[in-house]
Amino acid sequence: MPNIKSQKDRVVQAKKEAMHNKAIKSNLKTVVKKADAAISAGSADKDTAVKAAVVAIDKAAAKGVLHKNTAARKVARLAKAANRAAN
């Protein structure tokens, strides 16, 4: 446990930021999982699910929760799966 006041503040801030990032990642996993399920089931709303997942991935990258290359890779794989299912 830190003794310096600024370091005590940083511990609190880091915990708060970690909880925020965890919430974003958790929501991201849920949305991507729904999109994958919609693609594999071939449901009619798969396009909206994929779009929602792409938006969530882009927002996570913009907030710094995901690296931009990781976000691009996830979007590309999702789009590839959606296009493969469409054919």
Image: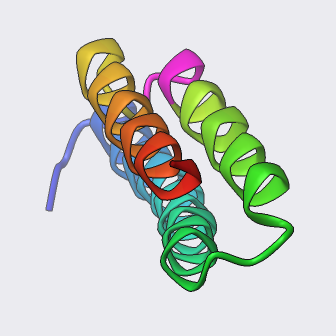
The one nearer the camera, 32 or 10, is 32
Q: Classify 61 as above or below 65.
A: above
The one nearer the camera, 5 or 65, is 65
Residue drawn at (52%, 62%), measured in percent from left and top? Answer: 32
The one nearer the camera, 62 or 20, is 62
Residue drawn at (84%, 70%), measured in percent from left and top? Answer: 44
Rendered location of residue 78, percent (x, y): 43, 45
Q: Is residue 9 magenta?
A: no
Q: Does residue 67 appear left or right of residue 61 in this picture?
A: left
Residue drawn at (48%, 24%), measured in percent from left and top? Answer: 61
Q: Classify 68 as above or below 8.
A: above
Number of dots carrying numbers: 0
- Seen from this angle, which residue lies furthest front? 87
- Determine which quarter of the picture holds residue 51: top right
Location of the N terminus (image quadrant): bottom left
Q: Is residue 62 magenta?
A: yes
- Determine which quarter of the picture holds residue 45: bottom right
The one nearer the camera, 2 or 81, is 81
> What residue range appears in magenta?
61-65
Residue drawn at (65%, 29%), measured in percent from left and top? Answer: 59
Rendered location of residue 29, percent (x, y): 47, 67
For the rendered model, the colour scheme is rainbow
